[in-house]
Image (cartoon, coloured by chain):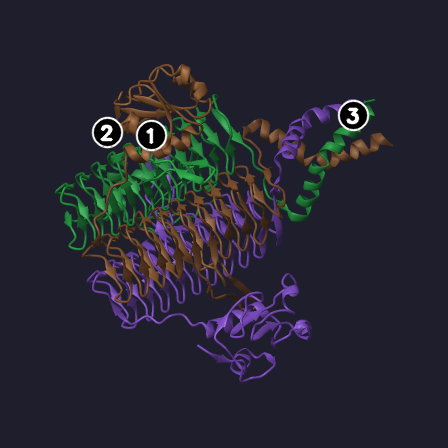
Chain colours: A purple, B brown, C green
Amino acid sequence: MPISLGELATSQGCELIGDPDATVSGVASLQNASPESLSFLSGSSYLSQLPTTKAAAVVLRAEDADACPVAALICDNPYATYARMAALVCPEPLFAPGVHTTAVVADSATIADTAHIAATAVIGERTVIGEHTVVGPGTVIGSDCNVGDNCRFIARVTLVQDVRIGTRGIFHPGVVIGADGFGNAMTTDGWVKVPQLGGVVVGNDVEIGANTTVDRGAVGDTVIEDGVRIDNLCMIAHNVHVGAHTAMAAMTGIAGSAVIGKRCLFAGKSGTVGHINVCDDVVVAAKTFLTKDVTEPGTYAASFPADNARSWAKQLARFRRLGTLIERVKKLEK
Amino acid sequence: MPISLGELATSQGCELIGDPDATVSGVASLQNASPESLSFLSGSSYLSQLPTTKAAAVVLRAEDADACPVAALICDNPYATYARMAALVCPEPLFAPGVHTTAVVADSATIADTAHIAATAVIGERTVIGEHTVVGPGTVIGSDCNVGDNCRFIARVTLVQDVRIGTRGIFHPGVVIGADGFGNAMTTDGWVKVPQLGGVVVGNDVEIGANTTVDRGAVGDTVIEDGVRIDNLCMIAHNVHVGAHTAMAAMTGIAGSAVIGKRCLFAGKSGTVGHINVCDDVVVAAKTFLTKDVTEPGTYAASFPADNARSWAKQLARFRRLGTLIERVKKLEK
Amino acid sequence: MPISLGELATSQGCELIGDPDATVSGVASLQNASPESLSFLSGSSYLSQLPTTKAAAVVLRAEDADACPVAALICDNPYATYARMAALVCPEPLFAPGVHTTAVVADSATIADTAHIAATAVIGERTVIGEHTVVGPGTVIGSDCNVGDNCRFIARVTLVQDVRIGTRGIFHPGVVIGADGFGNAMTTDGWVKVPQLGGVVVGNDVEIGANTTVDRGAVGDTVIEDGVRIDNLCMIAHNVHVGAHTAMAAMTGIAGSAVIGKRCLFAGKSGTVGHINVCDDVVVAAKTFLTKDVTEPGTYAASFPADNARSWAKQLARFRRLGTLIERVKKLEK
């Protein structure tokens, strides 16, 4: 819906250079913006696109305002400010309260009057769904779950059982929370399944990406604290504890009973082994795997950037001859 | 259904050495073929199985025909020719037009008369489904999607919203297209969600494997061009652009805003960081991760083959002593 | 349900040191146990928690019994014994026989009288579901599948078609079995899909984790033998053969036609290339990728533990100068 620059500036405490009555009705990148678009500039990567933007207004830092050919909304954190403004310009769709006739809700479940339960959703015994929460189509919420207010299960999410979720959570399609952890005891007759009897506790303001899995605890709970953001196709194993505001990019895997601190950042395809402790404010580079406790904040890495395959083959051969090389140096030293 | 060798040869322009009236009714590997089977030989790996095959006929190159103990269908590209013949011998099942009584279709959706909407499928507002398209059971297609003709959503696929798909696409169970990208702005109070407002555009003849996710753009669209093939459990992040006829094997991950060229091949567990450009005709080896622009066609690699664990431990120790080794060589040089 | 220590000891052939009439009604870790809990000690990692445990009883080895402040259930394999006892203390919920009114079952399907078909499940033509098998909500079982007795499909599982499963299998949400393998033949006009016409055969006592995919064979079947355990988000490609009692942790990927032996262990994020043979009793370390046949049992590894990013950058630079270093040593040798 069209919203004036003045209103946007006021809502986020920005300085506005430009006409407060001008309006925007959508968002776009600097390059693709039209005169109805709000755009933003954060960091220097896209600075070269600023002088030619056709946007109605650009959210940016004071130092970039001079180079802005259109209205400027000036603030300290343009990306976050843009995010909040974009939510005003393009609000989430509203979902009418009520339970769709094709949804299947157990008699003992408690659904808030303002909740929306979509077509073909299934809700189990003794489960509680909070106010304004949207349970999208094809979602299965098993028994004994407790979901807070203003959550959104987009579609086809599964909470298996004994999952407790705070408020304002967002869960994308294919997410599975509360499946059994991978607990198997070896015997001479093969594996014996170790019953997985814990639950999952998810805090407030958590977002979990498509097809990510969070297993229930073996005994005791798997815990995801407030404000955690997890991308698609990640794996959080049984009894993992993820600290508040930690973010994990796609395909990250955290093995069982690992304890991850607050405000950590896991880049794509990273992970940890099980049963380790990672302190607060740790950054793990892409494809990197933590194999022991981390007690110092900082960035950790262990991956090799791609090389031309022929060069890499040579390099691999050199690597394999390291033992010989060390011998040769030893010999020279004698 | 039984089909004669003559008909197969004619359909694909092959030379047939053998009885054109003989028939095949199924397909099999050289080793497991029965006298009703069509088989093929492509490359030399399975050449040793040719002399003893019990197949009715084998699709192969001219140079291998002499060694073929049964009827031979001769062509330049046996694997592709076999693929087309197999589709004739074992045609896809037919799906009756119509909407199952348990499917839930929004009033404003437009479903082609020849489309098949299976049990428990859900289709949202203003969505258009093309001729002969099959929407399998449990599939959820959200609002404002446009699906072309002759597509197949096998089962339990999700298109979240604003997804446009061309013709003849095949989408396997668990695929999620159009979920929110991973956009988060850090503030002193934690993460602010950056609204994901773009769509996804998928070309013609695209196939996407089970449980793969393709996120919607943040602003602007994520794009999958014609003829792209993506295997299971892959991740295509927001605003990625995948060029025509590129193929990605299982567990490949492409991070946000990466632009991938045409006819690229990504082997299993490979990927790229975000915001890079990869030119046409690039091959990325298994487990290899591109970290910067690739401007030259060719093969890129950066992974270590598995070694005996004891040898590997020694090798790791040698690797860690590289700094010392360099010092020792420096000393020797003095 | 409360169960006496005497009954537990007898059921598993343990020696009990303590009151046989004391009861337990739940399970817990040593640290979190209450006087109603059964706990266990396996290995030495948690030995320090034994002296202060508040558990009713601890399953442990004879050598640890003296340090146990509460009742002790003594056995040789405490983890497996605990697993079996936990299944007695916390039995699986029972599912009433019958087909839910919202389930959609094809006329030609055969559902055992004691099977439970939950809300919104869909079962295809000619499919057979065995006694006491539970087909959870949102599960889609396609045509021509055969599922044995006492299986559990927790929720939202998909068997595409031609999948045969033995008895006592457990399949977690999001599992996809029998989707098309990744078969594509390159032509000058782009990819031609190679029809995937095989099935999947799964043995008895197999458990498969959330969002894992097992593709159908191209020709012939993909095979998972008895007692195999596969964790979440794994990929088993077409025509793979996994030997009995092999276990794969999360995010393992096995490429097409690989043959994996019995009792192998794949740690998280490991895998193999296609078309290789791996013998029995092979252990593959985390993040390690087998690239050729393995003929000797043992442990295989090829990954680098994470390092401080600055150290790693230096180490990478050293690694890249290996060629120069070798030249320098060669020069010194002359």
**Horizontal and vertical percent for residue C238?**
37, 34
Q: Same chain, marks 3 and 1?
A: no
Element carrying mark 3: helix
Element carrying mark 2: loop
The residue shown at (48%, 24%) is C294
Q: Quadrant of the C terminus of chain B?
A: top right
Residues at marks 3 and 1 touching, judged by CB atoms closer than 8 Å:
no
**Horizontal and vertical percent for residue A105?**
22, 61
Above or below — where is A99 with respect to B100? below
Along the line of sight, the residue nearer the viewer: B4 or B32 = B4
Q: Which mark is residue C330?
A: 3
Along the line of sight, the residue nearer the viewer: A65 or A249 = A65
Q: How many marks can you see?
A: 3
Q: Which residue is mark 2?
A: B2
Q: Which residue is mark 1?
A: B10
Amino acid marked by disc 2: Pro
Q: Which mark is residue A291?
A: none
